[in-house]
Image (spheres, rainbow, N blue to C red):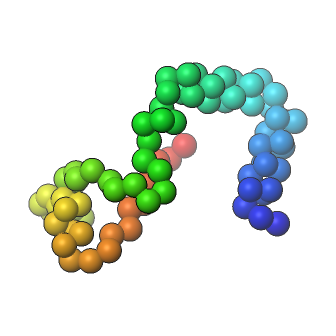
């Protein structure tokens, strides 16, 4: 099963088990879309702006500094739900 079909199955399951939660979630998604955020987010192939974060070793590290060393993969961890 493809990822898209699997995610749809999960969403459909949520709708069946918790219709109020599903409706609220869809409402939040529509509220976000109404802000125009989809037009402002990075798309595949876009260049990320430079930023600095604290490294796991302490100190600060910037995206620009990492890119000079080679390709960089960015991952985003939302944290605990």
Number of numbered discs overlaid on the protein picture: 0
Task: Give the x, y percent position of residue 73.
Answer: 38, 68
Up-down relation of residue 52 to residue 39 (above or below)? below
Q: Quadrant of the C terminus?
A: top right
Residue plotted at (19% across, 72% down): 68
Position of the N terminus by quadrant: bottom right
Depicted 41 relative to depicted 65: above or below? above
**Residue 78 visible, this orientation:** yes
| Side (left or right) of 48 relative to 12 | left
In the image, farthest residue toward the right: 16
42 or 4: which is nearer to us? 42
Residue depicted at 21% across the width and 77% down the height: 69
Question: Is 38 left or right of 21, judged from the image as shown?
Answer: left
The location of residue 35, given as percent across then percent down, is 49, 23
Q: Quadrant of residue 54?
A: bottom left
In the rendered image, the residue lying farthest to the bottom is 70
**Residue at figure coordinates x 44%, y 41% from the top left:** 41
**Picture coordinates of residue 72, whole percent (x, y):** 33, 70
């Amino acid at each position: 099963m493809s990822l898209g079909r699997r995610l749809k199955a999960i969403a459909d399951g949520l709708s069946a088990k918790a219709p109020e939660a599903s409706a609220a979630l869809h409402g939040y998604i529509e509220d976000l879309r109404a802000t125009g955020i989809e037009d402002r987010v990075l798309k595949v192939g876009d260049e990320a702006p430079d930023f600095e974060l604290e490294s796991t070793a302490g100190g600060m590290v910037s995206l620009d500094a990492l890119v000079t060393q080679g390709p960089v993969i960015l991952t985003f961890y939302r944290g605990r739900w």
